[in-house]
Image: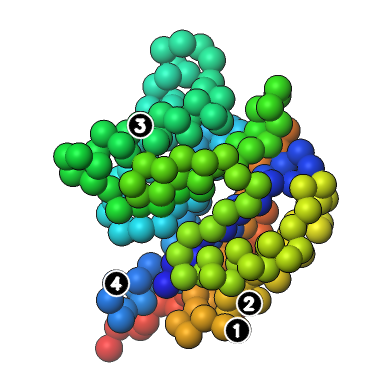
Amino acid sequence: MECVFGLVGNGFAIVAADTSAVHSILLHKNNEDKIMVLDSHKLVAASGEPGDRVQFTEYVQKNVSLYKFRNGISLTTAAAANFTRGELATALRKNPYSVNILMAGYDDEAGASLYYIDYIATLHKVDKGAFGYGSYFSLSTMDRHYRSDMSVEEAIELVDKCILEIRSRLVVAPPNFVIKIVDKDGARDYAWRQSVKDVTTAAV
């Protein structure tokens, strides 16, 4: 029951993801961070099979770092998104990854941007996007309330509305979410929305 969504505002992009690590009917943990800081001004929010999600996002992160190390300049968000799409397309005909990605970034010339990349290597630049069962509620909520000139405070309020809809309407809703933001000051954590703490079971 994964939920990943994001949007672009006035000079920034925000992505949010649930923090549940689930297998079958089992919940393993409530604090799994599914949003990776790709570099100083890029974020990757991913959903999909846990092994594919972790392995592929780390692979992209290391290759983006390698490019900067070799060439002395960072990839733009568009270039990183196209690289990611190319790797998914190559793997699709060999050993496909079951992973869906929202890539958010900020570039000096282009400003903030958000890219939608799914498991069959579809790439789109979007103003708002979502993956998982939560997308049924977050997309409709964003369709109703989203504006391209939103401030950070307004965007966070909209993200909270999406989280509230998911928690109240999805049958098996994830309790906790992490929110991250990227703007001219860089990519960073913004907040965690927790309704359930991760409790360690005492040994019997």
Q: Which residue is mark 2?
A: 165
Which amino acid type corresponds to the residue marked 3 in the rendered image?
Gly
Q: Which residue is mark 3?
A: 86
Q: Nearer the viewer, residue 9 or 45?
A: 9
**Dots 2 and 4: beta carbons under 8 Å?**
no
Q: Which residue is mark 1?
A: 168
Q: Which residue is mark 4?
A: 23
- Residue projecting furthest to the top: 71
Element at badge 3? helix
Locate residue 113, reporting x and y percent. Answer: 64, 38
- Closer to viewer: mark 3 or mark 4: 3
Q: Is residue 34 visible?
A: yes
Q: CA distance from mark 1 to mark 2?
A: 5 Å
Which amino acid type corresponds to the residue marked 4 in the rendered image?
His
- Closer to viewer: mark 2 or mark 4: 2
Q: CA distance from mark 3 to mark 1?
A: 38 Å
